[in-house]
Each structure stands twice: as structure tokens, then as C-alpha cells.
Amino acid sequence: MSSMTRRTLLIGGAATAGATLVSLPAQAAPEFTCKFANNLPLAHPLNVRANEAAARIKADTGGRVELQVFPNGQLGSDTDMLSQVRSGAIEFMTLSGLILATLVPAASISGLGFAFPNYDAVWSAMDGSLGTYVRGQIAKSNLVAMDKIWDSGFRQITTSTRPIDKPADLKGLKIRLASAPIFISLFKSLDAATTPINFNELYSALQTKIVDAQENPLSILSTAKFYEVQKFCSITNHAWDGFWFLANRRAWERLPESLRPIVARHINEAAMAERADLAQLNNSVRADLAGKGLKFNEPDVAPFRDALRGAGFYETWKKNFGEEAWAALEKSTGKLS
Ligand code: X2X
């Protein structure tokens, strides 16, 4: 903080009873510039709330910390961004636990097929012992996960060819999956023809028919405009997904101890606001998508779950995750295997 012309800032806001006048030094440039990268469109609530958090972090650190938001895979695919966060080329990213599992296997436990019956069960797990367990595992890889996971949503299958009504409809279906071992296992157990493709190439892969199907939450179908290149949407709710807000550990620890709690607080508050945004969006998004031509069906999911059980899916993943993690999951979901 050098050139010290003083200026007066008006700090106000909904939560402040009356505005306060504070005198702060003008900042020529921030002391800590942090890149935050993610795979989602700018219109997705995650980016809306991240931009809001960036402005609040700047204000509350007196301009010392700048969070630069790079949405939409601008800095690369998820797997590229993960390498960059690990090396420190990017300070922060949000990443689905499903894909983070390529580095931290425990992170995909929240994406286990047909595990969570509803959002109450999700948040009790992720804000409770399961979340604590997964963050502990993430910490072993020299990444820091903020306390609150961001919502992506319950995932649904879309296709350009046919509605998915029963397990046999998945047989041979050319479906794109994220690079997520647990999803590849799930869809292979149901005999689909799976292709891993990064999200930043998905729209064009659907458009050019490299694949006929994909699966994502409705909020992503809507903000990434997949309704333009898909016809059917089957409400399978086959897995819940969320985004961990990850920091490179060295970059995080470079921030002075006095600033870290401010940054963490605004990021976690933004996550809570984003969860509420998605809860709201979930009330209207299906009707919007139907209006844009997507045809919906609601299969009975019991036969899908039975088929997975029959294929040994739950037994395999229980072994992979281990007793401690499985018990933490079942505390919120009830008995799974
Ligand atoms: O790649 C996807 O499908 C996405 C955006 O949902 C994830 O981040 C897993």
C-alpha cells in the first residue's frame, strides 16, 4: 500500500442499519490478485454469486484482495483447471466432487447413484459429517476446500433420440459423461455406451452428434442452452452433484491471517445464496425448458436402482469408499446397500 491519497468510501448495504462513512487509503493495485475459474456459463447462479462475493471481498479488504472470476471454461477444461490449481497457476476453482474424484477418490461419494432422496438429506450430509470427511481428504492433496459446497443439483438425462423410461432404454445409448469414475461405473452397469468429454466441449459434441445423450441438472441445461441440441429429458434424479470451492494451499496461506476469514466468509455466504437461487430456479426451470421444446418424462426409478444393486454397484462402491465414509453417507440417506 504505497501512494496514499486518502479517499472516502461510503459503505452501506441491506444488512447495515444506516450507512457508515469510513476513510480508506486508495489502492493503486490490489496486493493479492486471485484467479477463480470454473466451467459454468456466466448466467449460472454460481457465477452471479461469485461476482458478488468478489465485490464484497474487495470492499471488506480495503481493496487488498481481488478475486478475478473466469467463467465458462475460459481457462481450460475442468481437468486442465484442476492441474492449474494444483500447480498454483490458478488460485481458486470450483469443481464437481465427481471430477475431483480423479485426484481425491472420496470426493465422489456425494454423487453416488440414487443416494440422496431430497435436498434436506444432501445438506445434512454435506454440512455435516460427510462434508467434513471429504474436506479432510481434499486437504491431503494440498488443496483447501471452503466449508460450504455449492449446489449443482440433481442430475437428469437428456437425449436427442428417445426418452429414458426403463433401464433397458440406456442399453447402448451414446452418452457423454464427465470424467467421473463413479458415473462411468454407474452407466456402464446399466450397459450404456459412455464417452468422457469435458463440459466445455459438450454443447458441440451434442450438436455434431458425437454423442446422443448427456446428463446434468436442469439449471445447467437451461444456462448452457442444451435444450437447443437435445429433445428429451428424463427426470431420473440419478445423482446429486455439488461444486467444492477449492484453493491452492500455498496461495491460500499467502493471504495474511487477518484476510483469510474475510475471504472465506464471503465465499461461504455466496455458496449459501447460490443454494437458495437454485432452490428458487428449480421451481420454474422445468416449465421454461418445456416451453423451449424439451419433452419431459418421469420414469419410476426403482428398476434402475434394482439393476444397479443386481450389478453389485453399491457393494463395489462401499468397498471403494470404506466404512467411515459410507456410514457418514448413510446417516443422511438411510441404508443403501
Ligand atoms: O461436466 C458436467 O457435466 C458438470 C458441469 O455438471 C460438472 O461439473 C460435473
Image: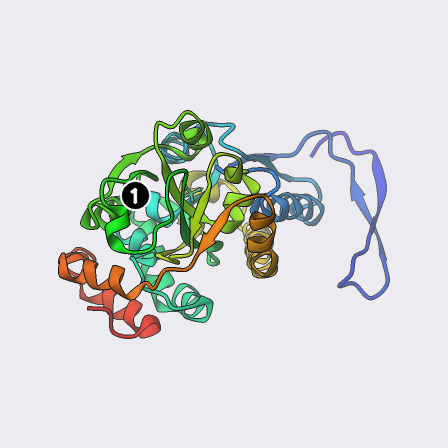
Which quadrant of the frame does ligand 1 lie within? top left
Res. 265 in view: no
Against 228, residue 48 (above or below) is: below
Identified at 32% across, 63% down, the residue is: 301
Identified at 65% across, 34% down, the residue is: 30
Badge 1 marks a residue whose secondary structure is loop
Q: Is residue 310 left or right of residue 97?
A: left
Against 336, residue 170 (above or below) is: above
- Which residue in the rendered view is the most extreme toward the top? 208
Assign the N terminus to one quadrant of the image: top right
Would you call the spot at circle 1 few (<14 residues within 10 Å), some (14-19), or many (20 or more)? some
Q: Where's residue 320, x and y in %?
A: 17, 55
Q: Where's residue 196, x and y in %?
A: 30, 35
Identified at 61% across, 60% down, the residue is: 280
Q: Where's residue 36, x and y in %?
A: 53, 37
Res. 171 in view: yes
Q: Where's residue 97, x and y in %?
A: 36, 49
Q: Nearer the viewer, residue 147 or 258?
A: 147
Q: Which residue is mark 1?
A: 180
Against 203, residue 157 (above or below) is: below
Kind of residue indicated by mark 1: Ala
Identified at 30% across, 67% down, the residue is: 329
Q: Is residue 103 left or right of residue 86?
A: left
Assign the C terminus to one quadrant of the image: bottom left
Q: Is mark 1 within 8 Å of ligand 1?
A: yes
